[in-house]
Amino acid sequence: MPIFWRHIHFHHKEPRLAMERYATWVQRSKGVQLNISINTEPFARSAVENVEAIMELFGPHLERWRSLQIDRVALQNIRILLDLLKDGSLPLLERLRVVVLGEGFLQSNDADCEWLGQFAFAAPQLKEVELIGVAMDFNSPLFHNRHALSIGVKGFTKLEPQAIKDIIHQLLRQSPDLKQLFIKKPPTLIRPPYQKPLNPPLINEEPFSYPSLVDLHIDLHGAVHDAIILSTRFPSLRSFRSAWMPRVTLASWHLPLLARNSPFPSLKQINLFGNRHDRKHDRYLVDALCTLTSLEWLGLEQFDMSLVRVANALLALGDCCPQLEALVLLKCTRVDLNQICSLVDMRLRVDGMTGLRTLRIDGGIDTTAPELKVTKAWLEQRVEDVTL
């Protein structure tokens, strides 16, 4: 059966006039699973009649629906469609995407999101949910088995970080098997400027542990990251990304938390940002790195590499973080290449350690030192990609 028979797109202003063609489509699809996509056009005129015509033809085949995409449709029209699905059963539905009209790429205002309530149909196989511009009651059993959730909510940008953290914790508690969570704000044409995070507030609550999440992407400001990091432990998290960054960046004042709570023992990539004006937290760097036992990529930015506590952390990388493959030093000061060579050599000698494959040092090196050329040649013999 050709793949295109699986995809049904409703994009006519008068879909009733095309029902004969859609009926032929259903007949020829011969029981294959269907991917249903409805955009705003069928709602341009006679919304109720058009959607009723669609459901009259495809409603008897709910058991074949594999995905449902409602794309840029006004909220009242989304409710019309969902009312027609009320108490229905979609046993094979795996993916649901709902985008409210006005959530296009050019939209940049911060209007509140719309409340959709609960979905009142059964979808026991639902794994992926994407909601943009709408909020709903996540206590619905519909969401308890999902593995991936993507939410784009304009209203999030108006909430305090602690309130967003509480919402995310609620989602996690309702979804014990969730593996991917993407919290995003509606896209705009303007890329927001990078803002250096401020010291996070102290939180005395016991960390909430969520063992199943593997991939977390939060497209919101740094204070939200702080609220989540300070209150949550993700034992299986491999990827933690933020708005425009491929990996999470934590400041030096997060180091005590990393050392104490070990929130990300499975994390693969992290960037740690030092504070030139306050080095007191650097003493936790060794213990923090030792909790990142699955790390493959490490960035250290604006650290004073001559401080004993930082030098000890660099030395500790010789026998901790066994999977580390890439080390990047950005805008650090007083980098000692002898220490770097010792680290590279130690990882090659210690059993169970992965040798470094990428070494990048941007700043902090005396480029006039006569031994620089020899040192670089020594490193290039042992590390695949070296940039000094």
Image (spheres, rainbow, N blue to C red):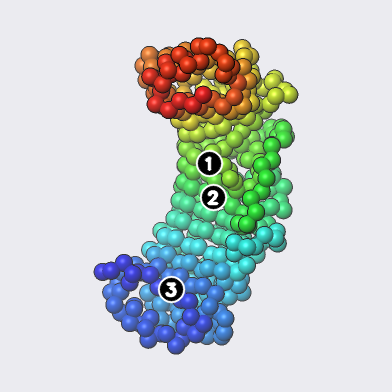
The Cα atoms of the two marked residues, 3 and 1, are separated by 34 Å
Question: Which residue is labeled 3 in the image?
Answer: 9
Tell me which label, 1 or 2, sits earlier in the chain.
2
Q: Residue 223 vs residue 316: left or right? A: right
Q: Tell me the element at label 1.
A: loop
What is the x, y in percent for residue 300?
57, 27
The Cα atoms of the two marked residues, 2 and 3, are separated by 26 Å
Q: Amino acid at mark 3?
A: His
Q: Tell me the element at label 3.
A: strand
What is the x, y in percent for residue 317?
49, 19
What is the x, y in percent for residue 100?
59, 67
Q: Is residue 175 above or below residue 358?
A: below
Which of 362/170 is in front?
362
Q: Tell me the element at label 2.
A: strand
**In the rendered image, is residue 338 in sight?**
no
Which of 239/211 is in front?
239
Q: Are marks 2 and 3 in contact (CB under 8 Å)?
A: no
Q: Residues within 10 Å of mark 3 (few under 14, many from 20)?
A: few
Q: Residue 75 vs residue 31: left or right? A: right
Q: Residue at x 34, y 78 (%)?
A: 25
In the rendered image, which quarter is residue 64 located in?
bottom left
* Viewport quadrant of the N terminus: bottom left
What is the x, y in percent for residue 135?
62, 60
Question: Which residue is labeled 1 in the image?
Answer: 246
Q: Amino acid at mark 1?
A: Pro
Q: Residue at x 72, y 53 (%)?
A: 158
Q: Residue at x 64, y 62 (%)?
A: 107
Q: Residues within 10 Å of mark 2 (few under 14, many from 20)?
A: some
Question: Which residue is labeled 2 in the image?
Answer: 182
Which of 91/44 is in front?
44
Q: Amino acid at mark 2?
A: Phe
Q: Is residue 207 above or below residue 145?
A: above
